[in-house]
Image (tube, rainbow, N blue to C red):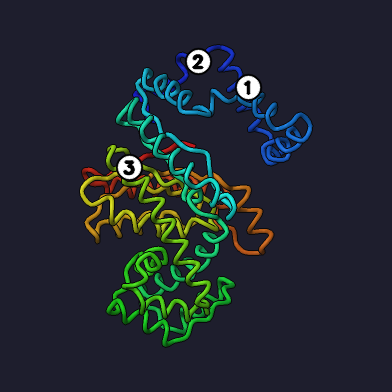
């Protein structure tokens, strides 16, 4: 949301609603509670059942943090927000599809997003939509693609910096990556781009989506990762379905002139999503900025990533769309890093995150151009 006056959103809150909000903030002060909310919720559903649990949560906190469970409730919420002189980001809380859910739920998910766009702009043309990519395809396959995209990103960054084959091998080894590309494969990648590899050139999503015109790249990538024809076809099919679903929503948003914000997700999906967002920037943000991507400043590399997005957009004559947040998955990221015995991708302290946020804001203001769109979310 954006507001003309700090705290204005609370102006018409009832005493009971403010009291509930205060109790929530008090709960957030106790890590033992916040880190175990999922376990508490699971225990409640087992004890009194999921329906009663969700009903209680809706009564206690629902109207504070949730816009509604249906479009009638959503529109009421959006109208209340508009009366306060505010704009809203409508977020559909659906993510992490399994392969089974992808088959049974995807049509309804697409419909919900399109209906959410209709509701948002019906109430206020300044409203926008937040979209989770992991609600459009099963996260198991997306996680695999993220693994391969991460390696391609390391190779891409190394080629941009003119590193030789042995240097690239050492970088991969230092990151505990067991993929061992051959020198001929690395040289071939560099040769395809005329020795001038740029940011987001080795975009696995885009390469698979346009496989017919990228056969040489497909062959090299298949060789680097030792992908069988069956796995490669699975990835191609997955990306084409993902593109079809996302495009349907993006086209609907474009027809309604509605801004879409691609939400940030966990690091084991985020690199794939970053490259996917870059691909759609080229299709959507040529003349008007209708697509934004989310940058999480608790990630150690995020100031560099923001520069990367800006450089990419300027090189391709695109408008920049960025939503800047501090981050949302700290406990999970640290837990996974500890379990896998790798360095956590996020900062070890809040001060470093504050510094990243400040540096990012400074860079954005220094490089912001007319018609770019940027949101700073204080979270």
What is the C-alpha distance between the residues marked 2 and 1?
A: 14 Å
Could you tell me which residue is drawn at 48 percent across and 41 percent down?
A: 108
Q: Which residue is mark 2?
A: 13
Horizontally, is 295 left or right of 281 in the view?
right
Q: Secondary structure at mark 3?
A: helix
The answer to whether 201 appears left or right of 241 in the picture is: left
Eyeballing the image, is 284 above or below 337?
A: above
- Mark toward the start of the polypeptide (2 vs 3): 2
Q: CA distance from mark 1 to mark 3?
A: 35 Å
For this rendering, which residue is in front, 159 or 6?
Answer: 159
Judging depth in this view, the residue of 232 and 132 nearest the camera is: 232
Image quadrant occupied by the N terminus: top left
Mark 1 element type:
helix
Label 2 vs label 3: CA separation?
Answer: 35 Å
Q: Position of residue 361 (x, y in %)?
A: 37, 45
Residue 304 visible, this angle:
no
> In the rendered image of this protein, does residue 343 appear above or below residue 346?
below
User: Residue beneath label 3, please?
Assistant: 252
- As drawn, the residue found furthest toward the bottom would be 184
Q: Nearer the viewer, residue 250 or 104?
A: 104
Q: Quadrant of residue 111?
A: top left
Image coords of residue 210 (percent x, y) = 35, 67
- Residue found at x 37% / y 17%: 83
Q: Nearer the viewer, mark 2 or mark 1?
A: 1
Q: Sequence order check: which comes first, mark 2 or mark 1?
A: 2
Tags 2 and 1 in contact by the CB under 8 Å rule?
no
Q: In what element is the residue under mark 2?
A: loop
Q: Position of residue 264 (x, y in %)?
A: 47, 48
- Note whether residue 284 is visible: yes
Which residue is under mark 1?
60
């Amino acid at each position: 949301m954006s507001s003309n006056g700090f705290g204005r959103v609370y102006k018409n809150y009832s005493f009971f609603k403010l009291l509930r909000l205060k109790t929530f903030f008090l709960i957030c002060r106790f890590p033992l509670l916040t880190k175990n909310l999922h376990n508490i919720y699971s225990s409640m559903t087992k004890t009194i059942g999921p329906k009663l649990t969700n009903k209680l949560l809706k009564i206690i906190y629902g109207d504070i943090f949730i816009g509604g469970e249906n479009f009638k409730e959503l529109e009421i919420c959006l109208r209340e927000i508009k009366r306060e002189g505010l704009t809203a980001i409508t977020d559909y809380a659906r993510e992490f599809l399994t392969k089974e859910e992808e088959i049974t739920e995807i049509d309804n998910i697409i419909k919900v997003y399109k209906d959410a766009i209709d509701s948002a702009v019906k109430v206020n043309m300044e409203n926008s939509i937040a979209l989770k990519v992991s609600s459009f395809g099963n996260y198991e396959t997306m996680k695999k693609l993220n693994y391969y995209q991460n390696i391609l990103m390391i190779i891409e960054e190394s080629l941009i910096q003119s590193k030789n084959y042995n240097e690239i091998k050492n970088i991969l080894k230092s990151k505990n990556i067991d993929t061992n590309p051959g020198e001929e494969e690395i040289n071939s990648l560099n040769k395809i781009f005329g020795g001038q590899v740029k940011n987001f050139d080795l975009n696995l999503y885009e390469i698979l989506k346009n496989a017919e015109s990228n056969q040489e790249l497909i062959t090299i990538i298949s060789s680097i990762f030792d992908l069988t024809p069956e796995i490669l076809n699975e990835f191609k099919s997955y990306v084409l379905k993902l593109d079809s679903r996302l495009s349907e929503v993006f086209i609907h948003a474009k027809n309604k002139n509605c801004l879409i914000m691609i939400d940030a997700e966990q690091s084991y999906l985020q690199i794939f999503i970053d490259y996917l967002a870059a691909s759609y920037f080229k299709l959507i943000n040529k003349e008007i900025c209708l697509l934004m991507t989310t940058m999480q400043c608790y990630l150690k590399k995020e100031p560099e990533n923001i520069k990367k997005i800006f450089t990419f957009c300027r090189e391709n004559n695109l408008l920049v769309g960025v939503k800047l947040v501090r981050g949302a998955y700290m406990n999970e990221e640290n837990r996974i890093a500890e379990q896998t015995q790798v360095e956590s991708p996020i900062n070890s302290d809040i001060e470093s995150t504050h510094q990243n946020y400040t540096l990012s804001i400074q860079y954005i203001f220094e490089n912001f151009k007319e018609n770019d769109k940027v949101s700073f979310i204080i979270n």
